[in-house]
Amino acid sequence: MTVIGLDHIQIAMPRGREDDARAFYSAILGFSEIKKPDALFDRGGCWFVAGDVKLHLGVEESFKPALKAHPAFLVESAAMMETRLTASGYLISRDAPLQGYQRFFVSDPFGNRIEIMQRTKD
C-alpha cells in the first residue's frame, strides 16, 4: 500500500479563537470556511478550503504553537500576499533562497509558522 494523496492539513489552535482564525485564514489568505461535520462541531476550531487545499484548525487544550513544522501554501503572487499580511500587522521573516520559488514565513494569530510560496520561472 502507498500514500495516494493528501486529504487535509490540521493545525492546532487555542480554544475560543475561531474569529481570529477566520480573520487570518479567510480574510487575509483567502480561504473559504466550510462547515464542520455535526459530530465534530462541539470540539471547536474551524475548517477551510482554497482550491484543492483543505485546512482544519483544531482546538488543542494545552496549545503550543508549531514553530518549526508548518504548511507551505502556494500563492499566485507572494508580493501581493506579503503586502496584505504586513498591512494587517503581521511580521514577515525570510529564510535561505529556494530555487524556483519566492517565499517567506509568517506566524498565524496563534504563533504557528506558515510558509507562503510562489513558483517562479527560474
Image (cartoon, rainbow, N blue to C red):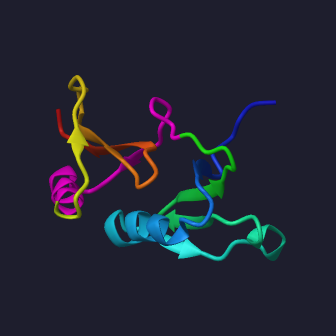
For the C terminus, the image quarter is top left
- Above or below, comparing residue 95 to residue 75 in the picture: above
- Above or below, comparing residue 94 to residue 118 in the picture: above
**Residue with the most extreme top position:** 96
Q: Please give left or right for residue 61 compared with residue 118 in the image.
A: right
Q: Which one is nearer the viewer's eye here, 20 or 10?
A: 20
Figure quadrant of residue 41: bottom right
Q: Residue at x 45, y 29 (%)?
A: 68
Q: Residue at x 53, y 73 (%)?
A: 33
Q: Residue at x 51, y 37 (%)?
A: 66
Residue 78: say if magenta. Answer: yes
Q: Which residues are magenta?
A: 65-86
Q: Which one is nearer the viewer's eye here, 81 or 13?
A: 13
For the N terminus, the image quarter is top right
Q: Please give left or right for residue 3 compared with residue 106 in the image.
A: right
Q: Please give left or right for residue 8 compared with residue 104 in the image.
A: right
User: Could you tell me residue 116's position as x and y percent?
Assistant: 32, 46
Q: Which one is nearer the viewer's eye here, 111 or 36?
A: 111
User: Could you tell me residue 43's position as x and y percent?
Assistant: 75, 64
User: Could you tell me residue 3's position as x and y percent?
Assistant: 71, 35
How many labels sit on residues?
0
